[in-house]
Amino acid sequence: MICMNLKELRKHHHYTQEDVAEKINVSRQAVAKWEKGESTPDIESCIALARLYQVTLDDLVNYQSDMGLGIPPKGKHLFGVAVVGERGQIVIPKKARDLFKIEVGDSLIIVGDEERGLAIVPESYTQKFFDQALTVNKHTRGDAE
C-alpha cells in the first residue's frame, strides 16, 4: 500500500526519485526500493515524505481509494459516496460525522453553486461565520459596540 502511495505522490508532484531522495536526504536507491515494495521507509523518512507531499502520515501509509482518486492534501477529506434515497435523503459517512461533530438532530445547511456543486455546512459553522463577518464589518466601519 505505501509503495503505491509513494509512487503516485511522487508522480503527482512531478518529482524524480532523485528529487525525492535529495529533498528528504536519502539515496535514490532507497526511494526506488520503497516504491517497488522491496523495503519500507523508517518513521523519520515517512514523516519527511508526508511533509514533502503535504499529506497526513496515516494517508501516506494507509490510504486506499476505491474510486481511483489520489491521496487528498492534509486537511482535505474524501469520505466516500453517498447514495440519494427515494425521498432525497442521504447518509453522511460516520468518519465525516465524527470529524465534524455532527450528531442526530443537528441542522445542516445545503448551499449550491451551479458551476461548483453542492456543499453541506453544519448550521453552527455558519453562525460562527456570520458572527465573525459582523465583527469585522463593525471594525471596518468604525462602529462602536
Image (tube, grey):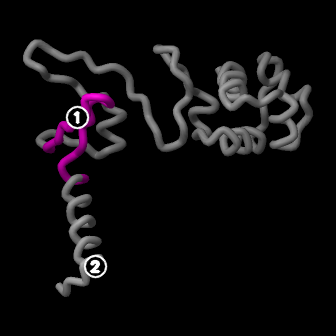
Residue 62's place in the image compared with 108, above or below, is above
Find residue 15 and report its image quarter: top right
Q: Secondary structure at mark 1?
A: strand
Left or right: where does residue 80 sit relative to residue 107? right
Left or right: where does residue 2 sit relative to residue 79? right
Does the magenta-highlighted stretch encompass residue 29? no
Residue 28's place in the image compared with 105, above or below, is above
**Tag of residue 112:** 1
Q: Residue at x 24, y 60 (%)?
A: 128
Other residues around mark 1 within 10 Å, as few (<14) / some (14–19) / many (≥20)? few
Q: Earlier in the sequence, mark 2 or mark 1?
A: 1
Which residue is more in the foreground, 85 or 134? 134
Residue 87's place in the image compared with 96, above or below, is above
Find residue 61 and report its image quarter: top right
Q: Residue at x 58, y 27 (%)?
A: 62
On the rendered image, what quadrant is the C terminus found in?
bottom left
User: Which residue reaches farthest bottom?
Assistant: 144
* Image coordinates for residue 49, horizontal then vertical, percent: 72, 39
Residue type highlighted by circle 1: Gly
For the residues bearing labels 2 and 1, Cβ distance under 8 angstroms: no
Which residue is more in the foreground, 42 or 130? 130
Does the magenta-highlighted stretch encompass residue 124? yes
Left or right: where does residue 140 sit relative to residue 11? left
Residue 116's place in the image compared with 64, above or below, is below
Which residue is more in the foreground, 115 or 40? 115
Task: Report the span colored magenta.
Answer: 106-125
Q: Secondary structure at mark 2?
A: helix
Label 2 sits on residue: 139
**Tag of residue 75:** none
* Image coordinates for residue 76, horizontal then vertical, percent: 46, 39
Q: Residue at x 87, y 29 (%)?
A: 30
